[in-house]
Amino acid sequence: MLAILVAALVLTAGSLLLALLVWLGLRLAGRGLAAGEAGLGAPPGRFWKRTRRLHLVLVPTYLFVVIPGAFGWFGSRGVATRGDEQGFIGPYLDARGAWQAQTRETLRVAASQGGGFVAPDLVEGADGVRVRVFLVPAASPSSPRATVMLVHGLFRGGCEVDAVGAMFHGLGAEVCVVELRNHGGSDAAPATYGLRESRDLVCVAEHLRRRPGAASRPLVLYGVSLGACAAALAAPDIGGLSGLVLDAPMAELASTAHRILDVRMGMPQPFRSLTLMAIERWSGFSMAAVRPLDALARLPATLPSLVIGGGEDQRMPPAVVRAVHAALPAGPDTKALWIRDGSGHGKVWRDDPGGYGDRLSALLERAVR
């Protein structure tokens, strides 16, 4: 709310300053009489009376149109990887071929350690947007247990899921790190918060399957936060999917967006609704169409899945994570739920890497049978 009030004050101060400059210009130009006849500048009282009346319209316009519209533009066009993760140039394999997980603090690994960074590739999405991917071969390239696609969250990039990639790699899988449109080295496009992003994932899956010998290989899809939303929407359209992991997933976009704007930004109504409406207009989509719960209900009951959440996650609280798990058609022997007490949003693998790795291993065992 403070940001909205400050923006409104800045815009109001700007228009009042413009009015003052106009009035001074008229006076200095010796057009006082003409301005007075037009009701613009002389006598001064008439000019400022009209200025006050104008601002009775301008201030509500600033509050309920201009500011939500500007926030909506940022939500549509301003999505990108956060600054301290933009230096991610790819997963790093040491001289022995072991994946060395990177963090925001250790993005630049010394080349003297040997090994090197995995080179990126660009895969064309459904509407021509190119997404950057990093395909890390399995430790035994001739016989990978599975191919795992990893998808990060909003304002993040490949660096966010690098540690998870190292876990899957250590379990014998080849790993494809996917950077969503607008993030990392992928192309920019109006953000749709999982809708068009999910179609990009389908294209990446098809790209991976077209490689020699890869068509029959088990394919596991993993996503965290926004990546979990995109993964859930894409999963029913990826033929022969062998496993699904959703960390910090959402049930549907509209209520999630309201919750985040409320909890994270303190934005009250009606500004939340106006901002979200502006995002929809700028990006050309409907948030009501982004419903992972509906997509998950279309999955086969035989698909192994793992749903993870943090007990202290305010963005995707435990009740939402449980609802996502309940929406999966699979039975208790095929799907698993883990809500770790004390963990926040997307922090479970950092808080308990051992437990996280164990659960990924169990999911992979079910997926490659």
Image: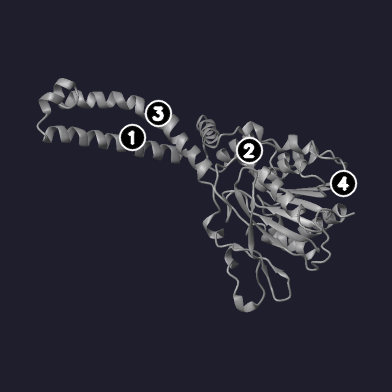
Is residue 341 visible in the rendered image? The answer is: no
Q: Is residue 334 left or right of residue 134?
A: right
Q: Pick whichever of labels 4 and 2 is earlier in the sequence.
A: 2
Residue 44 drawn at (x, y percent): 16, 27
Reading the image, the residue beneath label 4 is 334
Compared with residue 309, is residue 84 higher up or lower down, i.e. above or below? below
Q: Residue at x 60, y 75 (%)?
A: 111
Q: Decide: marks 3, 1 in contact (CB < 8 A)?
A: no
Number of the front mark, 4 or 2: 4
Label 4 secondary element: loop
Q: State the CA–CA distance, disc 2 to disc 1.
A: 32 Å
Q: State the CA–CA distance, disc 4 to disc 1.
A: 59 Å
Q: Residue at x 22, y 27 (%)?
A: 48
Q: Pick whichever of labels 4 and 1 is earlier in the sequence.
A: 1
Disc 1 crowd rating (10 Å Cα; few below 14, some 14-19, many 20+) is some
Label 2 secondary element: helix
Is residue 183 visible in the rendered image? The answer is: yes
Q: Tell me the kind of residue under disc 4.
A: Thr
Disc 2 crowd rating (10 Å Cα; few below 14, some 14-19, many 20+) is some
User: Residue 12's mark?
Assistant: 1
Residue 339 drawn at (x, y percent): 75, 48
Q: Decide: marks 2, 3 in contact (CB < 8 A)?
A: no
Q: Is residue 271 left or right of residue 28?
A: right
Number of the front mark, 4 or 1: 4
Reading the image, the residue beneath label 3 is 61
Q: Tell me the kind of residue under disc 1.
A: Thr
Question: Which image quadrant is residue 253 in?
Answer: top right
